[in-house]
Image (cartoon, rainbow, N blue to C red):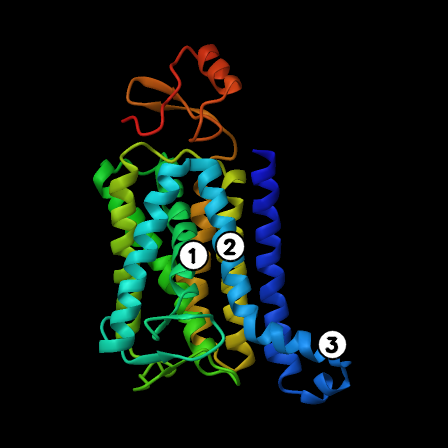
């Protein structure tokens, strides 16, 4: 477990550092090519490599960090139950969008994001749907399930978690899409520019719908057992969401695009922080009807300390997938 945690932290730090280097290259170095000419030959080669493969690296590290985190905290079944639907469904939507225009509109991917599946969609794109989608859904579901102020039926709370998770994901695209399609080195282009800073409004419906579909599939596969994580355990999903939003925000602001940033802050960052705050600060016992249940430190394997804690509270430890 310690080795997994080390790999998870290394991947997260590398993910953030890669985004920072990407920002420096796109915003500082490319507009001033004399900086590149001042570098030694080895430095110029390294810069060219970083600009060509930096996008691939940061997406891969983000996906690895979230994959390890999900496996470590929720178990391999829930990890795969989210990753497989999110990758397959988002890839299907992207292939359809780049070939028919549905559901996002007419667009093409350019270079810089890795090998293109069927010559249309970079292989890294479904991975970005996975790690941002997983972070968004966990924040929404854990926050809503931990709230004791709303007495909503389980199916209503589950549907609301999917809707909010898809909204967090779409709010990231409010900021990302204008930045990545209208920079000096764009990563994709719209064949028919839309009314919202070059994007069609259809794009946001496609984003929300695609996210809601794979989150719904994952929710069905995960079952009804609550996801019991503390704020500390939700730090990685929050860090992934905020760091990726910050990357897109800085790109947009540098291009003079600020209205999408305000929308993203209001509909993405603010709800994400509120939902994270709604999660319990520590593992506590809570009331469920007339039964007191123990919220265990992790949802995966039940450790001896957790069983001991449950015994002291005179309750049985909750098993993964139990109702």
Pinpoint residue 308: horizontal percent, then vertical percent.
50, 13
Disc 1 packing (10 Å; few <14; some 14–19; many ≥20): many
**Looking at the image, which residue is at 40% across and 50% down?**
134
Give neighbour class at mark 2: few <14, some 14-19, many 20+ (Cα, 10 Å). many
**C-alpha gap between disc 3 and disc 2:** 32 Å
| Residue 147 visible in the picture | no
Distance in Å between CA atoms under marks 3 and 1: 35 Å
Q: Is residue 304 left or right of residue 152?
A: right
Q: Which residue is mark 3?
A: 42
State whether residue 14 is above or below residue 104.
Answer: above
Q: Residues within 10 Å of mark 3 (few under 14, many from 20)?
A: few
Label 2 and label 1: CA atoms lie apart by 7 Å
User: Which residue is pictured at 40% across the width and 46% down the height?
Assistant: 138
The location of residue 214, given as percent across then percent down, is 28, 53
**Residue 177 higher or lower than 73, as above or below:** below
First in sequence: mark 3 or mark 1? 3
Number of numbered discs: 3
- Relative to 308, is 18 on the left or the right? right
Q: Closer to us: mark 3 or mark 1? A: 3
Residue with the mark numbered 1: 132
Closer to the camera in the image, 151 or 12: 12
Q: Are marks 2 and 1 in contact (CB under 8 Å)?
A: yes
Q: Position of residue 272 (x, y in %)?
A: 44, 53
**Precedes in sequence: disc 3 or disc 2:** 3
Q: Secondary structure at mark 1?
A: helix
Secondary structure under tag 2 reads helix
Q: Which mark is residue 240?
A: 2
Residue at the spot 67% in from the left edge and 87% down from the top edge:
32
């Amino acid at each position: 477990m310690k080795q997994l945690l080390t790999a998870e932290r290394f991947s997260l730090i590398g993910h953030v550092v890669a985004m920072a280097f990407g920002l420096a290259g796109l915003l500082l170095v490319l507009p001033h090519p004399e900086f590149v000419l001042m570098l030694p030959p080895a430095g110029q080669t390294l810069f060219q490599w970083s600009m060509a493969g930096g996008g691939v690296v940061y997406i891969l590290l983000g996906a690895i960090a979230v994959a390890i985190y999900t496996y470590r905290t929720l178990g391999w079944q829930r990890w795969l139950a989210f990753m497989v639907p999110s990758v397959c469904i988002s890839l299907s939507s992207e292939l359809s969008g780049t070939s028919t225009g549905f559901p996002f509109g007419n667009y093409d991917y350019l270079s810089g994001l890795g090998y293109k599946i069927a010559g249309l969609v970079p292989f890294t794109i479904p991975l970005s749907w996975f790690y941002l989608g997983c972070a968004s859904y966990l924040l929404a579901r854990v926050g809503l399930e931990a709230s004791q102020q709303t007495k909503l039926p389980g199916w209503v709370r589950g549907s609301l978690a999917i809707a909010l998770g898809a909204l967090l994901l779409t709010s990231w695209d409010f900021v990302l899409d204008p930045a990545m399609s209208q920079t000096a080195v764009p990563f994709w282009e719209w064949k028919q520019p839309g009314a919202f800073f070059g994007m069609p409004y259809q794009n946001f419906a496609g984003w929300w719908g695609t996210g809601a579909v794979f989150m719904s599939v994952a929710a069905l596969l995960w079952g009804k057992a609550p996801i019991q994580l503390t704020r500390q355990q939700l730090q990685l999903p929050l860090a992934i969401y905020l760091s990726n939003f910050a990357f897109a925000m800085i790109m947009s602001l540098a291009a003079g695009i600020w209205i999408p940033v305000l929308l993203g802050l209001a509909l993405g960052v603010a709800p994400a922080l509120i939902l994270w705050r709604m999660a319990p600060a520590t593992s506590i016992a809570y009331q469920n009807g007339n039964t007191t249940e123990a919220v265990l430190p992790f949802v995966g394997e039940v450790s001896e300390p957790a069983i001991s804690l449950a015994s002291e509270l005179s309750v049985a430890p909750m098993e993964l997938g139990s109702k």
